[in-house]
Amino acid sequence: MAIESLLIIIAVLAALLVIGVPISYAIGISSLAAILQVVPTDVAVLTAAQRTFVGMSKFSLTAIPFFILAGNLMNQGGIAKRLVNFVLAILGKLPGSLLVTNVGANALFGAISGSASAAAAAVGSMVKEGQEKQGYDPALCAATNAASAPAGLLIPPSNALITYSLVSGGTSVAALFLAGYIPGIIWALCCVVVAMIIAKKKGYRGVPGKFDWKNLWTATIQALPSLSLIVVVIGGIVAGVFTATEGAAIAVVYALILGICYKNITWKSFWNIVVDSAKMSGMIIFLVGVSNIMGWVMAFTQIPQTISALLLGLTNNPIIILLIMNVILLIAGTFMDVTPAILIFTPLFLPIVKTFGMSPIQFGLILVYNLCIGNITPPVGNTLFVGIKVGNTTLAKTMPYMLLYYIAILVGLMLVTFVPAITLGLPALAGMI
Protein backbone atom coordinates (compact mmCIF):
# COMPACT_ATOMS: atom_id res chain seq x y z
CA MET A 1 0.00 0.00 0.00
CA ALA A 2 2.77 2.43 0.89
CA ILE A 3 4.68 1.99 -2.38
CA GLU A 4 1.49 2.26 -4.45
CA SER A 5 0.44 5.45 -2.66
CA LEU A 6 3.90 6.96 -3.04
CA LEU A 7 4.00 6.17 -6.77
CA ILE A 8 0.54 7.70 -7.25
CA ILE A 9 1.59 10.89 -5.44
CA ILE A 10 4.83 11.20 -7.42
CA ALA A 11 3.23 10.45 -10.79
CA VAL A 12 0.23 12.76 -10.38
CA LEU A 13 2.31 15.54 -8.79
CA ALA A 14 4.92 15.40 -11.56
CA ALA A 15 2.29 15.36 -14.31
CA LEU A 16 0.44 18.35 -12.86
CA LEU A 17 3.62 20.38 -12.38
CA VAL A 18 4.72 19.65 -15.94
CA ILE A 19 1.47 21.08 -17.36
CA GLY A 20 1.79 24.16 -15.16
CA VAL A 21 -0.69 23.52 -12.35
CA PRO A 22 0.17 25.62 -9.24
CA ILE A 23 2.10 23.64 -6.63
CA SER A 24 -0.61 23.92 -3.95
CA TYR A 25 -3.30 22.46 -6.21
CA ALA A 26 -0.88 19.81 -7.46
CA ILE A 27 -0.10 18.66 -3.92
CA GLY A 28 -3.78 18.57 -2.95
CA ILE A 29 -4.92 16.67 -6.06
CA SER A 30 -2.06 14.13 -5.93
CA SER A 31 -2.75 13.50 -2.25
CA LEU A 32 -6.47 13.06 -2.91
CA ALA A 33 -5.65 10.60 -5.70
CA ALA A 34 -3.61 8.55 -3.22
CA ILE A 35 -6.45 8.63 -0.67
CA LEU A 36 -8.96 7.34 -3.24
CA GLN A 37 -7.12 4.03 -3.55
CA VAL A 38 -7.46 3.24 0.17
CA VAL A 39 -10.86 4.69 1.20
CA PRO A 40 -14.26 5.28 -0.50
CA THR A 41 -14.72 8.45 -2.54
CA ASP A 42 -17.04 10.27 -0.12
CA VAL A 43 -14.75 9.50 2.82
CA ALA A 44 -11.70 10.57 0.81
CA VAL A 45 -13.17 13.98 -0.07
CA LEU A 46 -14.34 14.58 3.50
CA THR A 47 -10.95 13.55 4.89
CA ALA A 48 -9.12 15.87 2.46
CA ALA A 49 -11.33 18.81 3.48
CA GLN A 50 -10.86 18.10 7.18
CA ARG A 51 -7.08 17.75 6.91
CA THR A 52 -6.84 21.01 4.94
CA PHE A 53 -8.80 22.87 7.62
CA VAL A 54 -6.73 21.30 10.42
CA GLY A 55 -3.51 22.23 8.65
CA MET A 56 -4.51 25.86 8.27
CA SER A 57 -5.98 26.33 11.75
CA LYS A 58 -2.73 26.08 13.75
CA PHE A 59 -2.16 29.22 15.81
CA SER A 60 1.60 29.20 15.22
CA LEU A 61 0.93 29.75 11.50
CA THR A 62 -0.03 33.35 12.26
CA ALA A 63 3.66 34.16 12.66
CA ILE A 64 4.19 33.70 8.92
CA PRO A 65 1.80 36.47 7.69
CA PHE A 66 3.24 38.87 10.26
CA PHE A 67 6.85 38.16 9.23
CA ILE A 68 5.88 38.50 5.56
CA LEU A 69 4.27 41.88 6.26
CA ALA A 70 7.27 42.99 8.33
CA GLY A 71 9.63 41.95 5.53
CA ASN A 72 7.64 43.83 2.90
CA LEU A 73 7.55 46.92 5.09
CA MET A 74 11.33 46.74 5.50
CA ASN A 75 11.77 46.26 1.75
CA GLN A 76 9.82 49.47 1.16
CA GLY A 77 11.34 51.25 4.14
CA GLY A 78 14.65 52.23 2.52
CA ILE A 79 17.01 50.15 4.65
CA ALA A 80 19.03 48.55 1.83
CA LYS A 81 21.20 51.62 1.21
CA ARG A 82 21.92 52.02 4.93
CA LEU A 83 22.98 48.38 5.23
CA VAL A 84 25.20 48.63 2.14
CA ASN A 85 26.94 51.72 3.54
CA PHE A 86 27.37 50.01 6.92
CA VAL A 87 28.97 46.89 5.45
CA LEU A 88 31.11 48.90 3.04
CA ALA A 89 32.42 50.99 5.94
CA ILE A 90 33.60 47.77 7.64
CA LEU A 91 34.83 45.74 4.67
CA GLY A 92 35.78 48.46 2.20
CA LYS A 93 39.53 47.80 2.44
CA LEU A 94 39.29 44.16 1.32
CA PRO A 95 40.09 43.11 -2.29
CA GLY A 96 36.93 43.34 -4.35
CA SER A 97 35.34 45.40 -1.61
CA LEU A 98 32.09 45.97 -3.49
CA LEU A 99 31.69 42.23 -4.07
CA VAL A 100 32.33 41.51 -0.39
CA THR A 101 29.97 44.34 0.58
CA ASN A 102 27.30 42.81 -1.65
CA VAL A 103 27.66 39.50 0.22
CA GLY A 104 27.51 41.04 3.69
CA ALA A 105 24.60 43.35 2.89
CA ASN A 106 22.66 40.49 1.29
CA ALA A 107 23.03 38.40 4.44
CA LEU A 108 21.77 41.24 6.64
CA PHE A 109 19.00 42.40 4.34
CA GLY A 110 17.84 38.85 3.58
CA ALA A 111 17.62 38.12 7.30
CA ILE A 112 15.55 41.27 7.91
CA SER A 113 13.29 40.98 4.85
CA GLY A 114 12.99 37.18 4.76
CA SER A 115 13.36 37.10 0.98
CA ALA A 116 16.44 36.12 -1.02
CA SER A 117 15.02 37.60 -4.22
CA ALA A 118 14.22 40.90 -2.48
CA ALA A 119 17.76 41.03 -1.11
CA ALA A 120 19.28 40.37 -4.53
CA ALA A 121 17.10 43.06 -6.12
CA ALA A 122 17.54 45.74 -3.45
CA VAL A 123 21.20 45.28 -2.52
CA GLY A 124 22.29 44.45 -6.07
CA SER A 125 20.79 47.71 -7.30
CA MET A 126 22.53 49.67 -4.53
CA VAL A 127 26.05 48.42 -5.32
CA LYS A 128 25.63 48.23 -9.10
CA GLU A 129 26.60 51.84 -9.82
CA GLY A 130 29.82 51.59 -7.82
CA GLN A 131 30.73 48.29 -9.44
CA GLU A 132 30.25 49.75 -12.91
CA LYS A 133 32.41 52.80 -12.08
CA GLN A 134 35.25 50.57 -10.85
CA GLY A 135 35.09 48.32 -13.92
CA TYR A 136 33.81 45.13 -12.28
CA ASP A 137 32.71 42.32 -14.58
CA PRO A 138 28.86 42.49 -14.64
CA ALA A 139 28.58 38.69 -14.81
CA LEU A 140 30.78 38.31 -11.71
CA CYS A 141 28.72 40.91 -9.87
CA ALA A 142 25.49 39.13 -10.82
CA ALA A 143 26.87 35.77 -9.67
CA THR A 144 28.09 37.21 -6.36
CA ASN A 145 24.78 38.95 -5.75
CA ALA A 146 22.68 35.85 -6.52
CA ALA A 147 24.92 33.34 -4.72
CA SER A 148 25.00 35.29 -1.46
CA ALA A 149 21.33 36.32 -1.24
CA PRO A 150 19.97 33.00 0.18
CA ALA A 151 22.27 33.28 3.20
CA GLY A 152 19.68 35.57 4.78
CA LEU A 153 17.04 32.81 4.62
CA LEU A 154 19.05 30.80 7.15
CA ILE A 155 19.59 33.73 9.50
CA PRO A 156 16.48 34.42 11.60
CA PRO A 157 13.76 35.48 11.48
CA SER A 158 13.15 32.76 8.86
CA ASN A 159 9.75 31.72 7.53
CA ALA A 160 11.31 28.52 6.22
CA LEU A 161 12.35 27.49 9.75
CA ILE A 162 8.89 28.35 11.10
CA THR A 163 7.33 26.13 8.44
CA TYR A 164 9.73 23.32 9.29
CA SER A 165 8.86 23.68 12.98
CA LEU A 166 5.18 23.11 12.17
CA VAL A 167 5.72 20.13 9.87
CA SER A 168 8.27 18.45 12.15
CA GLY A 169 5.81 18.24 15.00
CA GLY A 170 6.68 21.33 17.01
CA THR A 171 10.46 21.62 16.99
CA SER A 172 11.31 24.74 19.01
CA VAL A 173 11.27 27.83 16.79
CA ALA A 174 13.65 29.62 19.18
CA ALA A 175 16.13 26.73 18.98
CA LEU A 176 15.87 26.64 15.18
CA PHE A 177 16.43 30.39 15.01
CA LEU A 178 19.58 30.13 17.11
CA ALA A 179 20.74 27.14 15.09
CA GLY A 180 20.42 29.10 11.85
CA TYR A 181 23.00 31.78 12.61
CA ILE A 182 26.21 29.81 12.06
CA PRO A 183 25.03 28.01 8.85
CA GLY A 184 23.94 31.38 7.47
CA ILE A 185 27.29 32.93 8.34
CA ILE A 186 29.10 29.95 6.82
CA TRP A 187 27.17 30.42 3.57
CA ALA A 188 28.12 34.11 3.49
CA LEU A 189 31.78 33.39 4.33
CA CYS A 190 31.99 30.81 1.54
CA CYS A 191 30.83 33.52 -0.87
CA VAL A 192 33.27 36.04 0.59
CA VAL A 193 36.21 33.67 0.07
CA VAL A 194 35.29 33.02 -3.57
CA ALA A 195 34.68 36.74 -4.21
CA MET A 196 38.05 37.72 -2.74
CA ILE A 197 39.96 35.05 -4.66
CA ILE A 198 38.42 36.12 -7.98
CA ALA A 199 38.82 39.82 -7.13
CA LYS A 200 42.50 39.33 -6.37
CA LYS A 201 43.08 37.55 -9.69
CA LYS A 202 41.26 40.32 -11.56
CA GLY A 203 43.01 43.09 -9.64
CA TYR A 204 39.91 44.56 -7.98
CA ARG A 205 41.23 46.51 -5.01
CA GLY A 206 39.54 47.88 -1.93
CA VAL A 207 38.84 51.52 -1.12
CA PRO A 208 42.20 53.38 -1.08
CA GLY A 209 43.49 55.28 1.94
CA LYS A 210 43.35 54.69 5.68
CA PHE A 211 40.43 53.12 7.51
CA ASP A 212 37.78 55.82 8.02
CA TRP A 213 36.51 55.53 11.59
CA LYS A 214 34.28 58.59 11.22
CA ASN A 215 32.53 57.03 8.20
CA LEU A 216 32.08 53.78 10.13
CA TRP A 217 30.48 55.64 13.04
CA THR A 218 28.08 57.50 10.73
CA ALA A 219 27.15 54.35 8.81
CA THR A 220 26.60 52.42 12.06
CA ILE A 221 24.27 55.07 13.48
CA GLN A 222 22.25 55.08 10.25
CA ALA A 223 22.01 51.26 10.08
CA LEU A 224 21.47 50.66 13.80
CA PRO A 225 17.65 51.08 13.79
CA SER A 226 17.32 48.47 11.03
CA LEU A 227 19.76 46.05 12.65
CA SER A 228 17.99 46.45 15.97
CA LEU A 229 14.96 44.66 14.52
CA ILE A 230 16.89 41.38 14.55
CA VAL A 231 18.14 41.96 18.09
CA VAL A 232 14.72 42.90 19.48
CA VAL A 233 12.67 40.20 17.77
CA ILE A 234 15.08 37.27 17.93
CA GLY A 235 16.36 38.25 21.38
CA GLY A 236 12.82 38.34 22.72
CA ILE A 237 11.89 34.97 21.18
CA VAL A 238 15.07 33.23 22.37
CA ALA A 239 14.80 34.74 25.86
CA GLY A 240 11.20 33.60 26.11
CA VAL A 241 9.85 37.14 26.51
CA PHE A 242 7.35 36.50 23.73
CA THR A 243 6.42 33.77 21.24
CA ALA A 244 7.35 33.68 17.56
CA THR A 245 3.88 35.00 16.67
CA GLU A 246 4.13 37.87 19.15
CA GLY A 247 7.65 38.61 17.93
CA ALA A 248 6.39 38.74 14.35
CA ALA A 249 3.66 41.22 15.35
CA ILE A 250 6.26 43.39 17.12
CA ALA A 251 8.40 43.23 13.96
CA VAL A 252 5.47 44.63 11.94
CA VAL A 253 5.00 47.57 14.30
CA TYR A 254 8.76 48.22 14.42
CA ALA A 255 9.13 48.06 10.62
CA LEU A 256 6.13 50.35 10.09
CA ILE A 257 7.46 52.97 12.51
CA LEU A 258 10.89 52.77 10.89
CA GLY A 259 9.46 53.19 7.38
CA ILE A 260 7.40 56.20 8.47
CA CYS A 261 10.42 57.79 10.17
CA TYR A 262 12.48 57.28 7.00
CA LYS A 263 9.55 58.83 5.03
CA ASN A 264 9.49 55.90 2.60
CA ILE A 265 6.01 54.59 3.45
CA THR A 266 2.83 56.48 2.58
CA TRP A 267 -0.81 55.48 3.09
CA LYS A 268 -1.01 54.34 -0.53
CA SER A 269 2.20 52.29 -0.40
CA PHE A 270 1.14 50.85 2.97
CA TRP A 271 -2.13 49.63 1.50
CA ASN A 272 -0.29 48.03 -1.44
CA ILE A 273 2.14 46.34 0.97
CA VAL A 274 -0.75 44.95 3.05
CA VAL A 275 -2.51 43.60 -0.05
CA ASP A 276 0.66 41.99 -1.42
CA SER A 277 1.43 40.47 1.99
CA ALA A 278 -2.11 39.10 2.28
CA LYS A 279 -1.87 37.47 -1.14
CA MET A 280 1.48 35.86 -0.35
CA SER A 281 0.31 34.75 3.11
CA GLY A 282 -2.85 33.23 1.65
CA MET A 283 -0.83 31.19 -0.84
CA ILE A 284 1.56 29.90 1.81
CA ILE A 285 -1.12 29.03 4.38
CA PHE A 286 -3.27 27.28 1.75
CA LEU A 287 -0.16 25.37 0.71
CA VAL A 288 0.40 24.30 4.32
CA GLY A 289 -3.25 23.21 4.52
CA VAL A 290 -3.25 21.01 1.42
CA SER A 291 0.14 19.60 2.39
CA ASN A 292 -1.52 18.34 5.55
CA ILE A 293 -3.54 16.01 3.29
CA MET A 294 -0.29 14.55 2.01
CA GLY A 295 0.98 14.22 5.58
CA TRP A 296 -2.14 12.25 6.52
CA VAL A 297 -1.77 9.95 3.49
CA MET A 298 1.86 9.28 4.38
CA ALA A 299 1.01 8.49 7.99
CA PHE A 300 -2.00 6.33 7.08
CA THR A 301 -0.16 4.29 4.44
CA GLN A 302 3.13 4.28 6.42
CA ILE A 303 5.16 5.74 3.54
CA PRO A 304 7.92 7.20 5.79
CA GLN A 305 8.42 3.86 7.54
CA THR A 306 8.63 2.09 4.17
CA ILE A 307 11.17 4.56 2.78
CA SER A 308 13.15 4.32 6.01
CA ALA A 309 13.23 0.53 5.74
CA LEU A 310 14.32 0.74 2.09
CA LEU A 311 17.17 3.16 2.80
CA LEU A 312 18.31 1.31 5.90
CA GLY A 313 18.10 -1.90 3.88
CA LEU A 314 20.58 -0.48 1.40
CA THR A 315 23.01 0.69 4.07
CA ASN A 316 23.07 1.42 7.78
CA ASN A 317 25.89 3.95 7.35
CA PRO A 318 24.54 7.39 8.42
CA ILE A 319 27.09 9.18 6.23
CA ILE A 320 25.90 7.47 3.05
CA ILE A 321 22.24 7.95 3.98
CA LEU A 322 22.79 11.68 4.55
CA LEU A 323 24.66 11.99 1.25
CA ILE A 324 21.75 10.31 -0.56
CA MET A 325 19.29 12.68 1.13
CA ASN A 326 21.40 15.70 0.21
CA VAL A 327 21.48 14.65 -3.44
CA ILE A 328 17.68 14.14 -3.50
CA LEU A 329 17.07 17.51 -1.83
CA LEU A 330 19.49 19.33 -4.14
CA ILE A 331 17.75 17.90 -7.20
CA ALA A 332 14.29 18.65 -5.79
CA GLY A 333 15.36 22.20 -4.93
CA THR A 334 16.13 22.95 -8.58
CA PHE A 335 12.44 22.45 -9.42
CA MET A 336 10.56 23.38 -6.22
CA ASP A 337 10.31 26.41 -3.97
CA VAL A 338 11.54 26.11 -0.39
CA THR A 339 8.16 25.99 1.38
CA PRO A 340 6.48 23.16 -0.59
CA ALA A 341 9.70 21.14 -0.54
CA ILE A 342 9.86 21.44 3.26
CA LEU A 343 6.26 20.27 3.51
CA ILE A 344 6.92 17.25 1.29
CA PHE A 345 10.35 16.05 2.44
CA THR A 346 10.19 16.64 6.19
CA PRO A 347 7.76 13.76 6.90
CA LEU A 348 9.73 11.54 4.54
CA PHE A 349 13.25 12.07 5.85
CA LEU A 350 12.90 13.19 9.47
CA PRO A 351 11.89 9.71 10.75
CA ILE A 352 14.95 8.25 9.01
CA VAL A 353 17.51 10.60 10.57
CA LYS A 354 15.90 10.05 13.97
CA THR A 355 16.78 6.35 13.71
CA PHE A 356 20.47 7.18 14.00
CA GLY A 357 20.01 9.88 16.62
CA MET A 358 20.18 13.10 14.61
CA SER A 359 18.51 16.08 16.25
CA PRO A 360 15.45 17.48 14.43
CA ILE A 361 17.11 20.87 14.82
CA GLN A 362 20.18 19.83 12.85
CA PHE A 363 18.10 18.12 10.18
CA GLY A 364 15.96 21.24 9.81
CA LEU A 365 19.02 23.33 8.97
CA ILE A 366 20.34 20.66 6.59
CA LEU A 367 16.96 20.63 4.84
CA VAL A 368 16.64 24.41 4.54
CA TYR A 369 20.31 24.84 3.50
CA ASN A 370 19.82 22.30 0.70
CA LEU A 371 16.62 23.88 -0.54
CA CYS A 372 18.07 27.40 -0.43
CA ILE A 373 20.62 26.25 -2.99
CA GLY A 374 17.66 25.64 -5.29
CA ASN A 375 17.04 29.41 -5.24
CA ILE A 376 20.20 29.90 -7.27
CA THR A 377 20.13 26.88 -9.59
CA PRO A 378 18.37 26.61 -12.97
CA PRO A 379 15.75 25.91 -14.23
CA VAL A 380 13.65 27.58 -11.48
CA GLY A 381 16.30 29.52 -9.52
CA ASN A 382 14.28 32.71 -8.94
CA THR A 383 17.08 34.47 -7.06
CA LEU A 384 19.63 33.58 -9.74
CA PHE A 385 17.51 35.18 -12.46
CA VAL A 386 16.84 38.26 -10.30
CA GLY A 387 20.60 38.66 -9.88
CA ILE A 388 21.14 38.31 -13.63
CA LYS A 389 18.42 40.85 -14.39
CA VAL A 390 19.79 43.37 -11.88
CA GLY A 391 23.30 42.86 -13.25
CA ASN A 392 22.08 43.32 -16.83
CA THR A 393 23.94 40.25 -18.04
CA THR A 394 23.14 36.72 -19.28
CA LEU A 395 22.93 33.25 -17.80
CA ALA A 396 25.70 31.98 -20.09
CA LYS A 397 28.14 34.64 -18.85
CA THR A 398 27.13 34.24 -15.20
CA MET A 399 27.26 30.45 -14.85
CA PRO A 400 31.09 30.03 -14.98
CA TYR A 401 31.33 32.20 -11.86
CA MET A 402 28.30 30.50 -10.28
CA LEU A 403 30.06 27.14 -10.55
CA LEU A 404 32.79 28.43 -8.24
CA TYR A 405 30.19 29.66 -5.77
CA TYR A 406 28.33 26.34 -5.95
CA ILE A 407 31.50 24.48 -4.95
CA ALA A 408 32.09 26.74 -1.94
CA ILE A 409 28.45 26.61 -0.82
CA LEU A 410 28.44 22.80 -1.10
CA VAL A 411 31.50 22.71 1.16
CA GLY A 412 29.42 24.66 3.66
CA LEU A 413 26.61 22.12 3.24
CA MET A 414 28.95 19.28 4.09
CA LEU A 415 30.03 21.10 7.25
CA VAL A 416 26.43 21.66 8.31
CA THR A 417 25.58 18.03 7.54
CA PHE A 418 28.47 16.30 9.29
CA VAL A 419 29.49 18.70 12.08
CA PRO A 420 26.57 18.79 14.55
CA ALA A 421 28.17 21.54 16.67
CA ILE A 422 27.61 24.03 13.84
CA THR A 423 23.85 23.84 14.24
CA LEU A 424 23.53 22.62 17.83
CA GLY A 425 26.24 24.71 19.51
CA LEU A 426 24.26 27.91 20.09
CA PRO A 427 21.01 26.15 21.17
CA ALA A 428 23.09 24.05 23.59
CA LEU A 429 24.74 27.16 25.05
CA ALA A 430 21.29 28.68 25.52
CA GLY A 431 20.13 25.55 27.34
CA MET A 432 17.51 24.66 24.72
CA ILE A 433 18.76 21.11 24.08
Image (tube, rainbow, N blue to C red):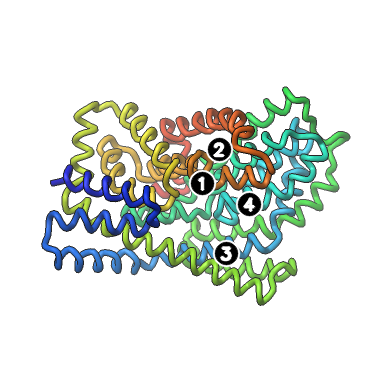
Q: Is residue 182 visible?
A: no
Residue at figure coordinates x 47%, y 60% from the top left: 240
Q: CA distance from mark 3 to mark 1?
A: 17 Å
Q: Is residue 250 visible?
A: yes
Q: Nearer the viewer, residue 37 or 54?
A: 37
Residue at figure coordinates x 67%, y 58% from the top left: 226
Q: CA distance from mark 2 to mark 3?
A: 24 Å
Q: Amino acid at mark 2?
A: Trp
Residue at figure coordinates x 83%, y 44% from the top left: 213
Q: Amino acid at mark 3?
A: Ala
Query: Where is residue 292 drawn, in percent x and y?
Result: 29, 59
Query: Where is residue 285 drawn, in percent x and y?
Result: 40, 64
Q: Secondary structure at mark 3?
A: helix
What residue is disc 3 on?
A: 70
Contact between marks 4 and 1 (CB within 8 A): the answer is no
Q: Report which quarter residue 212 is drawn in.
A: top right
What residue is disc 1 on?
A: 154
Q: CA distance from mark 3 to mark 4?
A: 12 Å
Find the residue positioned furthest to the right: 209
Q: CA distance from mark 2 to mark 1?
A: 9 Å
Query: Where is residue 9 drawn, in percent x and y?
Result: 25, 49
Q: Is residue 73 above or below residue 218?
A: below
First in sequence, mark 4 or 2: give its number: 4
First in sequence, mark 4 or 1: give its number: 4
Q: Amino acid at mark 1?
A: Leu
- The disc at residue 169 is none
Query: Where is residue 239 drawn, in percent x and y?
Result: 50, 58
- The disc at residue 109 is 4
